Amino acid sequence: MASEDERAFEAVTLANSFVDPRGRAAIVQWFPQSVVDLYDAVVARPDWQSATTLAERAFVVISALRDDPELEARYRADVEAGELGFGAGEDAEVDAAIAEVASSLGAVAAMAPDDGLLGGGGIGESWSPDSTAAVPADDGLLGGGGIGESWSPEPGAAEPPPPPPPPAPAPSPSPSPAPSAQPPASAPPAEAAPPDGGAAPPTGADEPSGGGAGSEAPAETVQTWLNAEVQGGEQKLEATHSYVLAVFFGEKSEEAAGAAPAAIPFGLGQATVDLSVQLVSSDFTVPPFPQQLRVGRDGASIGQALFPITPLHDGHSTLSVLVDVQGNFLQRLELEFDIGTTAAVDATAFGRPAGAAVELQPRTASMQFMPATGGYQLFVKGVTDEQVFVQLTDDELGARIEGVRKALLETVKDTTFALEMDIPPDLAAKALKALAFAGFRLYQAIFSGPFASDELKKVGAWLRESLADDVTTLQVVSRGFPVPWALMYLTDRFADDELDWKNFIGMRHVVEQVPMREISALPPAATITSTPDLSVRVLYHDGIDATMPSHPVAAQRAYWENRGVTLGEGTKVDDLVHSALSPTATDKVLYLYCHAVSSNTDSDSSYLVLTGDQQISLGQLAVYAPIEDQLQSHPLVVVNACESGDLSPDFYDGFVPYFLAKGARGVIGTECKTPGRFASEWGIAFFDRLFSGEPLGEAVLGLRRDFLEKHGNPLGLLYGVHCDTDTRVDPALAAAAAGH
């Protein structure tokens, strides 16, 4: 029989592993199926949600095994087969928890026979560790050398690498399908009714997570409902009183405080999707850590995520439910209560206009900005436990963005930048100084201004120091926050003699800007299918060639005529309104090579300019090509606005929501006017990369680095991505014809 110390050590180590901020994905990656199922059972328990210390969580692990003998038997078999190992604990918090649990187990043992590994109810009676179990070798699997520290990074610290895998065991049976935890009585029925227009529940829901070779379950996006329900049916919440909020997916709950349609992505053969759910609020006390929900192809979650909440005051109070897939933003449900009254809860669901790709890829860094009185609320998962207030008015933010725009305009107005591709080092250095100064001031204004809190400064330090130098996708989800993130310059202290293009976010990382808006339609997948054909519509301003000796429009036409796509072309406003933006359009790419002008006072007055200087404003588009006439083909919209008279990031604060609301999968555009020759060369190089199957975000980042390395030209930074950066063309097209 194992001693109380040994049993306590194992329970604490497992509990500590289960609060890893990477969630269930880390458990699946490094542990056998029995531990994955134990994790599912543990995190679904109310006593796990209410546990506040590591010792309390360890007792939940003990109880979960005691309550499920079949699970305990499979877990014990994996231990005996050598698939788990336990090293020596060296973390002070872990050691203290072990001592507390061991002491409690010892008290129980004094009153009852020793019942095994984890204590209580005989769960370990048949478990017989070998004689080496008292001092097992450290195999890197479950600890040794401070497992608590490596699995709970401090804000501002780089995320540690995952633990090394355990020694390869003998081949084990296929993982067991579905976790053993049963949904509570209040969970929705297994056959969830999707919202109107939703797809019928598909087959294949009984397969293990991730599916396998030969699985017939299709890649698709399943429609369901996200429910947030106050347990007990409370109609009136009182300040300082504690309640439990249950979050789950399935058919719409009539008892929910808030419910919203949700679109859950499933890959080919994938039977379940694991979602992370977290609450954030400045008006409620909420748990600081997320919980996991596993959702099947019927749209229903296995059990519920239970969160203890306490209103802090009477009156208007907001509680946000954040849902992501492996750190990739999926949905945000805003619940607005009137504490102390029986007033109905107002619920608003925000989601990704082009998100919910059939297979959402992991995001290691994600920020969410929402408007608030006097500034914005910022949440960064894994860095902050709650929302951080950014005290920054629209005018102040606009001034810093205008500073970046002025530096850009001064750069592109230079004759060499305007006419040449190759930029001399001295001119590039001058541009670097101006752009870096403006980009650094933008960084300071948001993250280290005179009113910045310590928590906000920690986020700034994380952004500056903790993101890896290799390719990382920085996802910025925002509402009304049109920051040119690629042009933000990161450094601790600004020094003219230590400037480097690599310090611009856009030269270091893929930057994915996701406008957050109310969910109204099922979003498209990230794959642009090229079969049976790839339909592209290109609209030009032919007058550009009259002022540009390089004749970029002619170069664009020659490229597209030899690109092997189903091509539609146009030069007039009518071609845009009545063809490209018609609900019957079949284009998968809409490419605008034209002028664009923004208004600093009214986004409706911003406009596009086509051949003959024909103009159409955003306001006119909203009337004559309304968003109600959805683009069923979900085109990628690329606005390559060259030689524009006036263009600022504010331009996209109007046009991006318009195109996305109309059904576009995403928008790529320039942050200010761009030299015609560079715009032409960039467009050709971009589409060659995209059509070759390269993910969109990597294509944009690769072009920035290529133009800088080969030509000393930094203007690739001008292009902003408002789209899922995993968007790609599949199957890939053949290379472009030579001589385009």
Image (cartoon, rainbow, N blue to C red):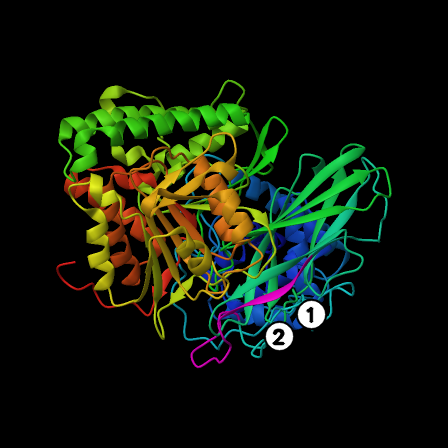
Q: CA distance from mark 2 to mark 1?
A: 8 Å
Q: Residues within 10 Å of mark 1 (few under 14, many from 20)?
A: many
The label on residue 295 is none
Residue kind at label 2, given as amino acid type: Pro
Residue designated by label 1: 192
Identify the image quadrant of the N terminus: bottom right
- Residue found at x 35% / y 25%: 438
In percent of width and height, residue 308 lies at: 73, 46
- 667 or 266, which is in the foreground? 667
Q: Marks 2 and 1: CB-CB under 8 Å?
A: yes
The answer to whether residue 328 shows anywhere in this view is no
- Residue found at x 62% / y 74%: 201
Residue designated by label 2: 201
Residue kind at label 1, given as amino acid type: Ala
- Judge whether residue 387 is colored magenta: no
In percent of width and height, residue 21 lies at: 53, 48
Question: Within the image, what quadrant is residue 519 found in?
Answer: bottom right
> What span is colored magenta in the figure?
209-226
In percent of width and height, residue 175 lies at: 51, 73
- 559 or 345, which is in the foreground? 559
- Residue found at x 29% / y 24%: 434
Identify the image quadrant of the C terminus: bottom left
